[in-house]
Image: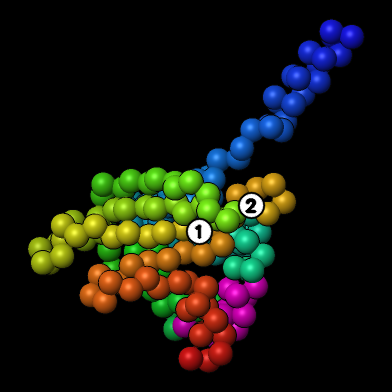
Amino acid sequence: MKTIAVVIASLIAFSGIGHAADVTAPVKEIMEATRSNWADNNSDWTDIFDASRLDRLYSRDFVAKYQAAAQFPAVDDDGISPFDYDVIVNGQDACPLEDLAMAAAPAVNGTTEVTVRFRKSACTDAPDAKDTTTVRFEVIEEASQPVIDDIVTENIETQARDSLKATMELIAKGQ
């Protein structure tokens, strides 16, 4: 009987049952791709919304809104993205990201806010070169996995928060 209990405990530990999934995992993957996109390494651009990432890293609601918005592609090289800017750096230009920091807040009503801060203009002489960009990822659990349900950027000029899901809804309406 003791052997069976040890085997069951080992299987539970190995399977991860009883352990909370790392809520920052999908955010880490997106931020690593974004960091690589803006690095000075001339690597190919990584689409943070490619099919494999949509299926794994984003909520069903986010994916539905993205797919609806993708029916109205922005002017870009591949003609499939609804955005003509990088939604993480919230612009078309950036330097290699510096001082990247990430922190997860306690979950509230099933949503964990993962806050990411970085400097995106450190390589320029622009007045905002030392400014920190803040992006908030709303992470929920679906099928026992953490997934990104929204990406919220902060508009420095207006101090407003801009929801990517709300932006995708507007794009899908042709606005």
In the rendered structure, find residue 160 and report the number of the disc placed on it: none
In the rendered structure, find residue 138 and report the number of the disc placed on it: 1
Q: What colour-coding does the image apply? A: rainbow
Instruction: Work out which residue is located at the far top of the displayed protein and give it.
Output: 2
Task: Give the residue displayed 63% in from the left and 61% down from the top.
Answer: 59
Mark yes or no: residue 29 visible. no
In the rendered structure, find residue 141 and report the number of the disc placed on it: 2
For residue 49, side relative to residue 154 (left or right): right
Q: What amino acid type should be assigned to the residue bearing mark 1?
A: Glu
Task: Give the residue displayed 33% in from the left and 67% down from the top.
Answer: 154
Q: Secondary structure at mark 2?
A: strand
Q: Is the residue 50 above or below the residue 158 in the image? A: above
Q: What amino acid type should be assigned to the residue bearing mark 2?
A: Glu
- Is residue 164 in the magenta section? no
Residue 131, how many percent across, how many down? 19, 60
Disc count in the image?
A: 2
**Which quarter of the rendering shows the N terminus?**
top right
The quarter holding residue 51 reads bottom right
For residue 3, side relative to residue 135 (left or right): right
Q: Is the residue 33 above or below the residue 70 in the image? A: above
Segment colored magenta: 64-74
Task: Give the residue displayed 69% in from the left and 32% down from the top.
Answer: 18
State the residue in front, 139 or 88. 139
Q: Secondary structure at mark 1?
A: strand
Instruction: Work out which residue is located at the far right of the displayed protein and give it.
Output: 1
- Is residue 69 in the magenta section? yes
